[in-house]
Amino acid sequence: MKAFASQADLEVKKTTFAELAEGVYCLTAEGDPNSGVIVGDDGVMVIDVRATPVMAQELIAEIRKVTDKPIKHLVLSHYHAVRVLGASAYGAENIIASDATYDLIQERGAQDYASEVQRFPRLFKSVETVPGLTWPSIVFKDRLVVRMGNREVHVIHAGRGHTKGDTIVWMPKEKVLFSGDLVEYGATPYCGDAYFTDWPQTLDRLAGFGAEKMVPGRGEALQTPEEVAKGLSQTRDYLSSLAAVVKEGVDAGHDLQQVHEEASRRLAPKFGHWVIFEHCMPFDVSRAYDEASGINDPRVWTAERDQEMWRSLEQD
């Protein structure tokens, strides 16, 4: 049997800290999870805080090269451990999340923590430094406007897609959008906790902002309106292609293993070169199979369920 998920992926990725607009930055890492940084008049906001406090220190070091202002606000685009467990390193006043994300942390945060560390250990450098789950101190329903001096930042629950709590950060003056994992660029969307039926409409909402630059959840920053449109289109194409193949298999009465094999065969020519394609496919197909079978809300992934699924689908 193949090594579980991405356990065999040990290659360290090169990080890049780049300025998108005055005082607006992103940290990208060759397809590993991205983070955003906004420098306001009175402090700093960080969007997606990395997986461990030790990994967060790498981002903090980059921030300190451009400003000595205090890091006041952390925004969680969603609840997944790789995005949130580094929060304790920043000493921030506020940790911001949607109410749906807060509910997911309560419901399945601990299980997700154990599951993600098992799946992708390279992304959890010095995991022993994580003090526990990250809990928001500010929870909002639809939209929260954060005024950082003269800089205005909108934190928006965009709708269900990658999870039910997906949050974006929109800068209306600068026309920069941080999408979280609702949009990926050259990287396979992880759909294990997704809502395939809702995700396309959520992408429509993102397109409606008219962003001129976008930081996706993974992949290079999108620096022009044309690149933004391409990132949205590519994400939508993957989701619709996968959902269609899986629904076809479910309607034909095929079991999960058969559907996974067929989906991998048909999607690989177009998407197989994307980062983490082989890692995501078993989880993506499993969730699409559930949804097509009438299971509306994602089932909780545990370390044990991960292993069971992997053994059933990834036999040589």
Image: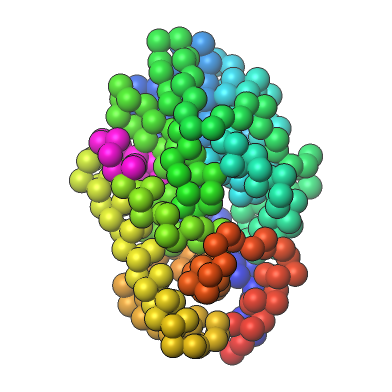
Q: Using the image, determine if residue 10 lies above or below residue 145.
A: below
Rendered location of residue 236, percent (x, y): 33, 58
213 falls in the magenta region: yes
Left or right placement of residue 313 versus residue 168 in this view: right
Which x, y percent locates residue 136? 66, 32
Q: In the figure, residue 55 lies in which quadrant?
A: top right
Specify whether 305 is left or right of 16: right
Residue 97 seen anywhere in this rendered image of the structure: yes
Read off the magenta span.
205-221
Q: Is 36 drawn above or below residue 279 in the view shown?
A: above
**Residue at (70, 52) in percent of width and height:** 108
Q: Is residue 20 left or right of residue 5?
A: left
The image shows residue 133 at horizontal and vertical percentages of 74, 42
**What residue sits 64% from the left and 67% below the top?**
7
Q: Nearer the viewer, residue 172 or 4?
A: 172
Whether residue 84 is visible, yes or no, is: no
Q: Position of residue 17 (x, y in %)?
A: 44, 36
The residue drawn where x is 44% and y is 77% is: 246
Q: Residue at x 60, y 42 (%)?
A: 101
In the displayed structure, 256 sits above or below 238; it is: below
